[in-house]
Image (cartoon, rainbow, N blue to C red):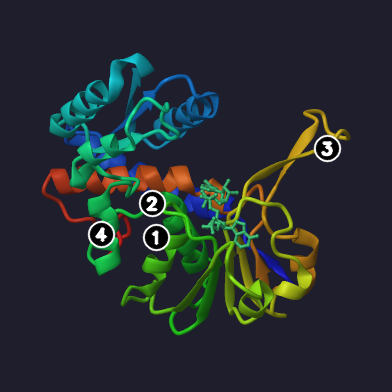
């Protein structure tokens, strides 16, 4: 019998924790504030920004959306981010991706380390690599959170990650390698040049797939009884639906239901946690800015 590990109840529990913490800070006159920097007109980023604003409002996290015209150039974006980094009212900053082609990707480095709530800067990634306290990219952290809250042991187990991007695969590998209860895994990372992918995936106690292609992992590639975490988000045509498409993950879900002991669904799995963790990190940053410790230490990886 396969357990479907859903993100929604986990996200709800974390949101309650955030709402309590935000109310406390608001009572002291300094509610947590997340700044969202949006450069240009990317429609998906605009939708994501609206969703952050909506979710933040529900848990008492204030938001400030800074919309910038792509014509402002790299210098203009850098200056805007530097201003937010200096602003004491702002506790967290996220720079929406993708950036217009005319803007240099290095602008993200202007985010102050203590406000880098999506672990996007070289400094945060370096700290993560060293196993020191930092904010990690929220999607990678969401995978760990799903496992921990789903009461799945990570320590000592063999985790195979398919995908080595800088936002998912690589940070996740480093999170899982930390010397902590949320880490101490043995980690294998696979990618498009991995030979005999199935040999690796079928050796996994916990298999995490972040490829960006439907059916990248099918039945025979999973060890019977494995825990399968699907990070993928893909739209596939489906004329039978109202919208003409549906969203699927990277793993063949029916196969996973037959082979795995635990599987995360798409939609309704890892993706439901990412914004919530961004808000939790903002709360943690606000607590630290106010001189308080993060009580459960859950808002930053170390
Ligand atoms: P990405 O940057 O395109 O990276 C994809 C990775 O998969 C690369 O490392 C690539 O290898 C590897 N890969 C591609 N084809 C492969 C194959 N046939 N066999 C083995 N490995 C293969 O993608 P990403 O940003 O990490 O995102 C991955 C998926 O997660 C996407 O579906 C994305 O939509 C989803 N995602 C979801 C969330 C969320 O839920 N909030 C957030 C971020 C991403 P190479 O490095 O060799 O090219």
- CA separation, marks 3 and 1? 33 Å
**Nearest the eye: 186 or 53:** 186
Q: Which residue is mark 2?
A: 137
Q: Which residue is mark 4?
A: 126
Q: Residues within 10 Å of mark 2 (few under 14, many from 20)?
A: many
- CA separation, marks 4 and 3? 42 Å
Tags 3 and 1 touching, CB below 8 Å: no
Decide if residue 254 is on the left or right side of residue 13: right
Quick check: is the Cβ at mark 4 less than 8 Å away from ligand 1? no
Q: Which residue is mark 1?
A: 171
Which of the two marks, 4 or 3, is nearer to us in this view? 4
Kindly identify the residue that appears in the image at 17 percent across and 26 percent down: 83
Residue 282, x across and y down, in percent: 30, 43
Tags 2 and 1 touching, CB below 8 Å: yes
Compare marks 2 and 1 and give the one earlier in the sequence: 2
Q: Which residue is mark 3?
A: 238
């Amino acid at each position: 019998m396969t357990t479907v590990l859903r993100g929604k109840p986990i996200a709800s529990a974390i949101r309650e924790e955030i709402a309590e913490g935000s109310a406390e800070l608001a009572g002291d006159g300094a509610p947590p504030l997340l700044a969202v920097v949006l450069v240009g007109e990317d429609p998906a980023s605009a939708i994501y920004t609206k969703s952050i604003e909506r979710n933040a409002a529900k848990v008492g996290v204030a938001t400030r959306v800074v919309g910038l015209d792509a014509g402002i150039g790299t210098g203009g974006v850098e200056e805007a981010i530097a201003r937010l980094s200096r602003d004491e009212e702002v506790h967290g900053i996220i720079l929406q991706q993708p950036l217009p082609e005319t803007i240099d990707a290095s602008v993200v480095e202007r985010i102050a380390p203590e406000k880098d709530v999506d672990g996007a800067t070289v400094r945060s990634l370096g700290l993560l690599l060293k196993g020191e306290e930092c904010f990690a990219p929220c999607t990678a952290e969401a995978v760990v959170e799903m496992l921990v809250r789903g009461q799945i042991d990570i320590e000592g187990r063999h985790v195979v990650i398919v995908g080595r991007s800088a936002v998912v695969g690589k940070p996740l590998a480093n999170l899982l390698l930390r010397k902590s209860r949320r880490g101490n895994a043995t980690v294998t990372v696979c990618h498009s040049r991995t030979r005999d992918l199935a040999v690796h995936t079928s050796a996994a106690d916990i298999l995490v797939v972040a490829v960006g292609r439907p059916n990248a992992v099918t039945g025979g590639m999973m060890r019977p009884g494995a825990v399968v975490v699907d990070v993928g988000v893909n739209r596939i045509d489906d004329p039978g639906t109202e919208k003409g498409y549906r969203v699927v993950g990277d793993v063949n879900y029916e196969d996973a239901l037959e082979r795995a002991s635990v599987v995360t669904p798409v939609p309704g799995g890892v993706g439901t946690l990412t914004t919530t963790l961004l808000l939790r990190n903002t709360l943690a940053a606000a607590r630290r800015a106010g001189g308080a410790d993060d009580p459960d230490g859950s808002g930053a990886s170390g």
